[in-house]
Amino acid sequence: MLVEVTAEDIANGTRASCANCPVARAVHRALGSPANVGLFEIWANDPFRQVKTTRAVRKFICDFDDGKPVAPFSFDIDVPPASHAPTEPK
């Protein structure tokens, strides 16, 4: 699935925010469900899905969080089938 991080995502994204950084905003739009983005993984909810980030995504996140100039870009992710979120043992 192609994810496009737009200039609007960059302008409205929040630094060091897993849920509102430009990448999270773009993934949310692409999947149609909220997403949290870490440096190495993306977690989407409703339904739960987890994917690894690419090198380009990690560089963008680091640059954005450090206040360096960033530009719109796109990346592909392999979206696995929906699964249930991990649960705590009872």
Image: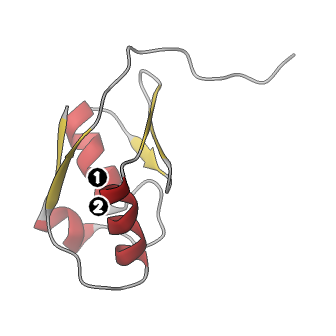
> Mark 1 and mark 2 in contact (Cβ < 8 Å)?
yes
| Whole-percent x, y for residue 87 in the image | 71, 22
Q: Distance between the residues labelled 2 and 1?
A: 5 Å
Whether 8 is drawn above or below 83: the answer is below
Residue 32: image quadrant is top left
Which mark, by number, is residue 74?
none
What residue did someone put label 2 on? 22
Q: Bin the neighbour count of mark 1 within 10 Å (Cα to Cα): few under 14, some 14-19, many 20 and up.
A: many
* Residue at the front extreme of this rendering: 55
Tag 2: amino acid: Pro
Q: Helix, strand, or loop for circle 2?
A: helix
Q: In which quarter of the image is the N terminus?
A: top left
| Whole-percent x, y for residue 48 in the image | 47, 24
User: Which residue is found at the position 36% from the left and 62% from the top?
Assistant: 21
Q: Judge from the rendering whether residue 43 lies leftward or rightward of residue 9; answer left or right.
A: right
* Residue at the right extreme of this rendering: 90
What residue did someone put label 1 on? 25
User: Which residue is found at the position 37% from the left and 39% from the top?
Assistant: 34
Tag 1: amino acid: Arg
| Whole-percent x, y for residue 73 in the image | 15, 59
Whether 12 is drawn above or below 2: the answer is below
Colour scheme shown? secondary structure
Residue 31: image quadrant is top left
Question: Looking at the image, which is closer to me, 32 or 73?
Answer: 73
User: Which residue is found at the position 83% from the left and 19% from the top?
Assistant: 89
Whether 88 is drawn above or below 77: the answer is above
Q: Helix, strand, or loop for circle 1?
A: helix
Question: Looking at the image, which is closer to me, 31 or 1?
Answer: 1
| Whole-percent x, y for residue 76 in the image | 22, 39
Observer able to see residue 5: no
Q: Judge from the rendering whether residue 87 lies leftward or rightward of residue 73; answer left or right.
A: right
Observer able to see residue 2: yes
